[in-house]
Image (tube, rainbow, N blue to C red):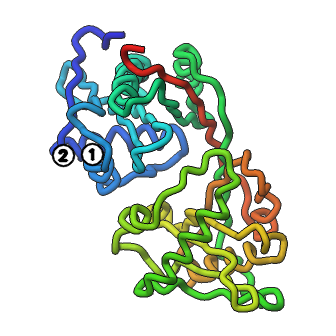
Amino acid sequence: MTLPAGWTARRPTLDDVPAILAVVHAADTFAIGHPDFDAEDVTASLTAPFFDPARDSWLAVDPDDTVVGWATVDNPTGVGREFLEVYVDPIRGAALRAPLLARQLDRVAERAAERGLPALTVRCAVFAPERDWERDLRAAGFTLAKRYVRMCRTLADLPAEPPPPPGVTVRQVCPDDDADLREFHRIHDIAFGDTPDHEPLSYERWRARIGDLTAWDEWFVAEVDGVPAGALQSSDQALDQQSGWVKSLSVLPAYRRRGVGAALLRRAFARYAEKGRAAAGLGVDLTNPTTPLSLYLSVGLRETHWTDMYELSVPAAGV
């Protein structure tokens, strides 16, 4: 597929970060009501492992040399499925999504061949207002794989943190203790092992991805009778909305339905409130077999919007 007459496509560089960010902010505001990306996120995407901006990404440029679209592929582990994002200015760039998607699917086919795979599964997200994007994906052969729900609660009326259930204690993770971080990683890996999309990541690669800029005081470990049983990882992805964000909540199977998850969430909410955050939020995969939705409702979280994930198997180039 080709771009409209007079439009061009080129590869991005780090000099394009401000222009890309403007497009992403416009797309996010249309999709979810507010920007959900910052300049550091764009830079991280363009410099991510297993990503080459000279091969894995495109910019769409209008006749006035203004960037109005950005297509990129994300695979932070270098294994498993690929994730495609196609951001466009919702006013001027709506017609660009289909041709940018076609270019990215061609690149996924090449990436599959480079990895010696017969095919690669690729996923794209669709937010509620993005009905045209949904039609583009279906026309390209994508089918609905699952739905994620984003949930939030205000912290203005946060009740006092109740004591945890008998035998349960919650503490901060110890970032300077390698053994404690390894235990945190182990809990996460085991707890998510029974979810359909879990892709195991070694401790070394997990630790490298975290880096040293984490707000460790928002990471917690729960113990039951002194035995590590649960872990909560926070993220700064919602700071622009003055919100704390639970990136993952993990409870080992033997300790579920014992109040461990609720105790971790309440401790995280209290910490966010201490820091002056206005709200707390998280995302939940509705296909998660642990059915955590009732837990999240019990601690005051409510659905704010949803995201559908569409999926396509792309044969390797030459297959």
Residue at 52% in and 16% down: 140
**Kind of residue at disc 1:** Leu
- Local crowd size for mark 2, using a 10 Å CA cut-off: few (<14), some (14–19), many (≥20): few
Q: Quadrant of residue 309?
A: top right
Which of 160 and 227 lies nearest the eye of the viewer?
227
Kindly identify which residue carries mark 1.
46
Q: Which label sits in the foreground, 2 or 1?
A: 1
Question: Is label 1 in a helix, a strand or a loop?
Answer: helix
Tell me how far mark 2 sits from mark 1, CA to CA: 7 Å
Which of 261 and 266 lies nearest the eye of the viewer?
261
Side of 143 relative to 27 (left or right): right
Residue at 54% in and 74% down: 277
Which of 93 and 75 lies nearest the eye of the viewer?
75
Residue at 31% in and 30% down: 68
Could you tell me residue 64's position as x and y percent?
Answer: 18, 23
Question: Is label 2 in a helix, a strand or a loop?
Answer: helix
Contact between marks 2 and 1 (CB within 8 A): the answer is yes
Could you tell me residue 297's position as x and y percent?
Answer: 79, 63
Could you tell me residue 285's position as x and y percent?
Answer: 68, 49
Q: Which mark sits nearer the N-terminus, 2 or 1? A: 2
For the question of whether residue 93 can be seen, the reply is no
- Local crowd size for mark 1, using a 10 Å CA cut-off: few (<14), some (14–19), many (≥20): many
Kindly identify which residue carries mark 2.
14
For the question of whether residue 225 can be seen, the reply is yes
Could you tell me residue 291's position as x and y percent?
Answer: 79, 55
Side of 11 relative to 259 (left or right): left
